[in-house]
Image (cartoon, rainbow, N blue to C red):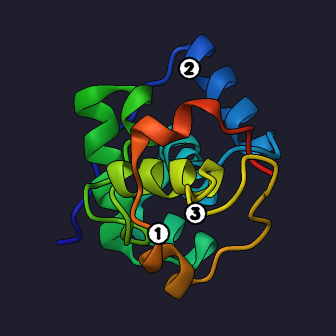
Amino acid sequence: MPRHAPPVNLTETDQMELERWVAAHRTPQQVSQRCQIILAAAQDRQDKAIAAELEINFKTVALWRNRFRAEGADCLWDVAEGRGRKARLTPGDVEKIVELERWTPSSRSSKAVVRRWSRSSQAAHPHDPKQNQNNSSRL
């Protein structure tokens, strides 16, 4: 006997919001797809039919149908931890690099400005925040 997916009941406000998210150009693709799943589920369509139309796995349809029923529309914007490109630099590393870019080495005159840094020149001039106070902004 085939499994019948539980119904999704949308309020008029929820339906309008989901349709607006699907139509918006700045909505991430994954969120738009989740909205399409819920809108189709609200029309009493089964998971396999929705999956075939959207060319996705039916388990994905079942997952978002169940999450929406349990958590509401806001869950469609959730992104699981660990997704996307991993940062190679910590925020502290980025801050140090920006400060180093603004820093003029003490061995040069105060009028001299370093326009380009190489890795070797950065390594040769360790950062000293006390000397950074009179330097101009990034070039």
Query: Relative to residue 83, is residue 121 drawn left or right?
Result: right
Badge 1 local density, few (<14 within 10 Å), some, or many (20+)? some
Label 1: element kind: loop
* Mark 1 or mark 3, earlier in chain: 3
Q: Amino acid at mark 1?
A: His
Residue indicated by mark 1: 125
Q: Amino acid at mark 2?
A: Asp
- Mark 1 and mark 3 in contact? Answer it, CB < 8 Å: yes
On screen, residue 75 above or below 138? above
Query: Relative to residue 50, is residue 36 drawn left or right?
Result: right
**Residue shown at the point (30%, 58%) measured from the top left:** 62
Residue nearer the viewer, 36 or 53: 36
Give x and y (percent) for residue 26: 76, 44
Residue indicated by mark 2: 14
Identify the mark at residue 117; answer none if there is no mark: none
Q: Quadrant of residue 12?
A: top right
Give x and y (percent) for residue 134: 63, 31
**Residue shown at the point (17%, 72%) measured from the top left:** 1
> Rounded to the nearest whole Å, what is the CA distance between mark 1 and mark 3?
9 Å
Identify the mark at residue 107; answer none if there is no mark: 3
Give x and y (percent) for residue 135: 67, 38
